Image (cartoon, grey):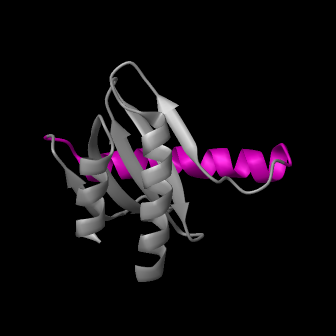
Amino acid sequence: MLDQLTQLVRDVDGAWAAAIGGLDGLLIEGHSTAATDLSLLIAEHAGLYRAASTAYSSTLNGGQTREMYLRGERLSVYLHPIRAEYFLLLAVDARSNLGQARLYGRDTARKLEAIL
């Protein structure tokens, strides 16, 4: 799994971290080129992802969440589900290419799904 995460960071312009997290907020595996706490990134984004998924599926009748992108001043994150209980997190900087993040993230999530 680490090989896939490392390759994902290499493939996406502006990416600096990739990780697999559980919806329980626990880090499964991760790779980062920056000094960052991947456990904290996973824990916080698991809560956001659960809340968004609940809102879309139950409150808004929008169906199952397929991906999520959050952009802040200093941090942007792309999330893609891996099965029902895991998700892929890709952290990117301001010069990132969202199209690449989506394309390579989706492909990596499929590969990881076969492993998990």
Question: Please, is residue 24 above or below residue 116 in the view?
Answer: above
x and y percentages locating residue 87 in the rendered image: 48, 60
Count of all numbered marks drawn on residues in the image: 0
Residue most extreme to the right? 61
- Image quadrant holding the N terminus, namely bottom left
x and y percentages locating residue 19 in the rendered image: 33, 57
Q: Residue at x 57, y 43 (%)?
A: 68
Q: Residue at x 34, y 41 (%)?
A: 91
Q: Is residue 22 visible?
A: no
Residue 45 lies in the magenta-colored region: yes
Q: Which residues are magenta?
A: 35-61
Q: Is residue 76 visible?
A: yes
Quadrant position of residue 33: top left
Residue most extreme to the bottom? 115
Residue 40 lies in the magenta-colored region: yes
- Image quadrant holding the C terminus, namely bottom left
Using residue 108 as the reference point, say whether residue 39 is left or right of it. left
Question: Please, is residue 27 above or below residue 104 in the view?
Answer: below
Question: Please, is residue 103 above or below residue 2 in the view?
Answer: above
Using residue 66 as the reference point, say whether residue 47 is left or right of it. left
Q: In this orientation, which residue lies closer to the viewer: 45 or 102?
A: 102
x and y percentages locating residue 60 in the rendered image: 84, 43
x and y percentages locating residue 36 in the rendered image: 19, 42
Magenta portion: prevailing SS class: helix
Q: Residue at x 42, y 72 (%)?
A: 112
